[in-house]
Amino acid sequence: MEDRAAPALENEQVFWELGRTLLWADGFVLIILVSPAEDLRRRTVDRLRRLLVSHGRSLTEIDLPSRCRDPLREIISQAPPDGSPLCVTGLGACGAEQAGLPAVLRAMNLRREQWARELRRPVVLWVDGGTHDLLVQEAPDLVAWSSAIRTLHFVPGRHDAPPFEALSPFADGSEFAALPLAHAQQRLAALQDVLFDLEAHDPTPQSASTRFRTALQVVALLYRCRRFAEAADLAQRMRDLAHAEARTPDEARCAAWIGLAQAARGRHREALAAFGDALTLRRALAEREPEAFTPDVAMTLNNLGLVLRSLGDLIGSRDRQEAEDLLRRWLELEEALGDRHGQAQVLHSLGNLIGSRDRQEAEELLRRSLKLGEQIGHVHQQAQVLHSLASLSGSRDRHEAEDLLRRSLKLLEALGDRHGQAQVLHSLGNLIGSRDRQEAEELLRRS
């Protein structure tokens, strides 16, 4: 576990640095981000988009085509006029149809100052390790001139911890999500003094609401400063007070914060219990005042789904039945939310998990996931599900499995995902080895 904790924590630190930059940068900033896997990049971009949306901003993704010889012109042609931050992928495939990537990078190096003049917004340039090495070799001035170079680390068998912006249980404290750490620490110290004075010198009923609001802001800042145990303890103390005074909305808020802090500590069962309590309280409130509390119910459902996902990942290898139960609960939550992205993801995970026990249901789940991926236009998700379907049907119908793998490969080639291509090429080569040894050898060499 410790071997995974350090790179996972580094990924979180990189994420928040990116988030602050994309939210608050004034004018052009170039960040070169090295990511070892497409799935890790996709999850990070999805988190960044949710963070920006929660602050009223948008994020634009631009995938450079393989025919591209001038990335700057291509980016400008696709960038919206609103000045929104950009995430740019596909650099490693540029120039494939012309002079090659080195020539493209050398031209970028010579024209680096035009990027600042013509883009005037934050830009995250995503590259893999090989492209980064070539970038350093062919465009050293551009690399030195960039604002930062950061690396995401692959963490085997682990999803990122539920992020603040996805789990934020209510409006109080959301303004602290992207606050620079030094500023958050200063605000925390000041508010802790205020809270101490309120509790020590003004314990009157009239000041109760002020104390409560201040306490929850302290909880939010403790979370921002990664002092999760203290955040959980203070939220629990405030929850006990709210419960004693029958202030149900405040008790629900505190329960949600307890879930958030416990999830960040890796205590997924405690987080699950706290979010479950928050959901029960908020559903009761929503029955009486739908307009006021239904959004809180939806947010709590989302929180529960994220924790169920993390818990299912952790126990899946040692208790498949419990992992299956958790995934089915997660699926119910995603369906209640109407989140097709989430449904596609959990259907894929569930189909993979039960494939060895119930092949027929697993195939139905995977095909539902594939259909949702097609509806929402998530090409990478479609490619992954096609690969999973091929693995499931390989022993039963090798012709169908081959067709599925070739469809997956075609999608991955269009995306420029070389890591995914290597996996599918390896599976395809092994599948057709007994039928066409020559092509199988070619595929395996390509992988």
Image: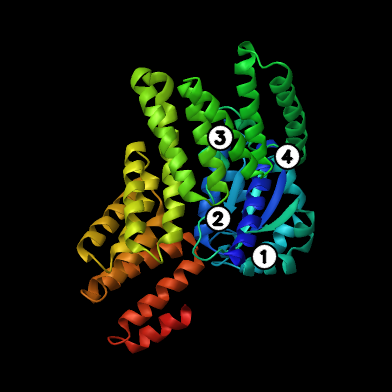
- Which is nearer the eye, 226 or 369? 226
**Marking on residue 64:** 2
Q: Amino acid at mark 4?
A: Pro
Q: Amino acid at mark 2?
A: Leu
Tell me the residue that label 4 is attached to: 180
Q: Nearer the viewer, mark 2 or mark 1?
A: 1
Q: CA distance from mark 4 to mark 2?
A: 32 Å
Tell me the residue that label 3 is attached to: 236
Q: Is residue 345 visible?
A: yes
Of marks 3 and 1, which one's residue comes earlier in the chain?
A: 1
Q: CA distance from mark 3 to mark 1?
A: 47 Å
Q: Is 254 situated above or below 354?
A: above
Q: CA distance from mark 3 to mark 4?
A: 26 Å
**Marking on residue 435:** none
Disc 2 secondary structure class:
loop
Q: CA distance from mark 2 to mark 3?
A: 49 Å
Task: Return the x and y of residue 120 as percentages of the image width and height.
Answer: 70, 39
**Marking on residue 132:** 1
